[in-house]
């Protein structure tokens, strides 16, 4: 008569580690804290995405990886942040693509004036082969792209007068992000464009160092620009994606399982962060009116006039990028428009 041997726990644990990847992955995740810095405030769509990312990473890592958020430009503006990522002194950030033109000029594609009519067109271009191809150029520059989130359509504010047509911009001193296209665009409208890091902007508006600025509506509200700006015009002149970035120097020190976890978390957040952005935008115009801003809602006809005015700027940057990528971008947009 055969006797049943007592099961060996170590044997079954070995089988579990061999055939269940989740357990072996957990063994490759170390205790660490990642610093995630960005220029916008915490109480908007940037902060919502960052916090959700931090929560998912902590959960997926079994509490081993914690993400510490540094909002509001506390660790510097976008240009300084890029340098910190490349040097490995900062782990993570997110920013609009326009400030990455110094890293790769092709990122200017998504900032072309009046390029997208709506967010659906932008999603298709970003989530397709073109968006991936641009992201794949980053490791050679010391950066890793994790995902494309959303900042939104930019609109114009100022403290001097309503802007109902592009001629009204003439003579205004307008702060822009630190990217050549924005300077060219607003100078073409007759403004005096001033590049400036976002953390310096509120004070510059308050002291009348600049007359106005341009940002998505949600950021205008969360940054409290309504306290120092009277007039808002819904120009929607540029759509800004957000790119979630990681330092390649730090990335190279992570295990493959840690990298996969971070990529999955960033892409899991993407649809929710975009939806938060769009839900907030739908509500915030009324909020800004309630704060006393005088809102001028531009017609599509006036936006078309503005598009024509800055067409030389668009053509200049299309030429710099090259015909192949430009054609691919417009083909993606045309495909979406054909489905509507």
Image (cartoon, helix red, strand yellow):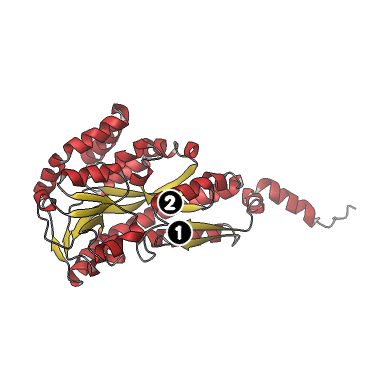
Residue located at (17% from left, 63% from top): 159
In-image side of 239 versus 7 (left or right): left
Residue located at (13% from left, 58% from top): 297
Residue 327 seen in render: no
Residue 274 seen in render: yes
2 or 1: tag closer to the N-terminus: 1
Residue located at (31% from left, 32% from top): 321
**Helix, strand or loop status at disc 1:** loop
Q: Which residue is mark 1?
A: 75
Residue located at (39% from left, 52% from top): 78
Q: Compare residues 42 and 338 and report the one nearer the observer.
A: 42
Q: Which residue is mark 2?
A: 80
- Find residue 272 and report its image quarter: bottom left
Residue 199, position as x, y percentages in the image: 36, 60
Residue 136, position as x, y percentages in the image: 45, 37
Whether tag 2 and tag 1 are in contact, CB under 8 A, the answer is yes
In-image side of 67 versus 294 (left or right): right
Tell me the CA gap for discs 2 and 1: 8 Å
Residue 1, position as x, y percentages in the image: 90, 53
Q: Compare residues 87 and 254 and report the one nearer the observer.
A: 87
The C terminus: image quadrant: top left
**Helix, strand or loop status at disc 2:** helix
Query: Please, is residue 54 above or below residue 323 in the view?
Result: below
Pointer 1: residues within 10 angstroms few (<14), some, or many (20+)? some
């Amino acid at each position: 008569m055969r006797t049943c041997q007592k099961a060996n726990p170590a044997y079954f644990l070995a089988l579990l580690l061999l055939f269940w990847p989740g357990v072996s992955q957990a063994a490759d995740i170390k205790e660490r804290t990642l610093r995630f810095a960005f220029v916008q405030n915490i109480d908007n769509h940037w902060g919502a995405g960052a916090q959700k990312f931090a929560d998912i990473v902590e959960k997926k890592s079994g509490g081993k990886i914690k993400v510490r958020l540094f909002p509001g430009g506390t660790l510097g503006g976008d240009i300084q942040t890029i340098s910190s990522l490349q040097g490995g002194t900062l782990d993570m950030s997110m920013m609009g693509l326009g400030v990455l033109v110094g890293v790769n000029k092709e990122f200017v594609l998504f900032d072309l004036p009046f390029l997208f009519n709506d967010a659906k067109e932008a999603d298709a271009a970003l989530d397709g082969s073109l968006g991936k191809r641009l992201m794949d150029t980053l490791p050679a520059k010391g950066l890793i792209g994790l995902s494309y989130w959303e900042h939104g359509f930019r609109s114009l504010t100022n403290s001097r007068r309503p802007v109902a047509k592009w001629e009204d911009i003439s003579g205004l001193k307008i702060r822009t992000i630190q990217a050549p296209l924005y300077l060219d665009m607003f100078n073409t409208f007759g403004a005096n464009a001033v590049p400036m890091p976002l953390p310096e902007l509120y004070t510059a508006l308050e002291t009348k160092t600049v007359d106005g600025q341009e940002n998505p509506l949600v950021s205008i509200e969360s940054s409290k620009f309504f306290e120092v700006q009277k007039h808002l015009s819904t120009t929607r002149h540029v759509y800004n994606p957000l790119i979630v970035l990681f330092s390649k120097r730090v990335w190279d020190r992570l295990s493959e399982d840690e990298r996969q976890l971070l990529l999955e978390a960033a892409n899991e957040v993407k649809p929710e962060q975009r939806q938060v952005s769009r839900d907030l935008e739908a509500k915030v115009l009324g909020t800004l009116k309630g704060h006393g801003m005088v809102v001028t809602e531009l017609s599509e006809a006036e936006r078309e006039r503005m598009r024509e005015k800055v067409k030389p700027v668009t053509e200049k940057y299309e030429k710099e990028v090259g015909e192949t990528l430009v054609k691919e971008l417009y083909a993606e947009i045309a495909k979406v428009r054909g489905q509507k």
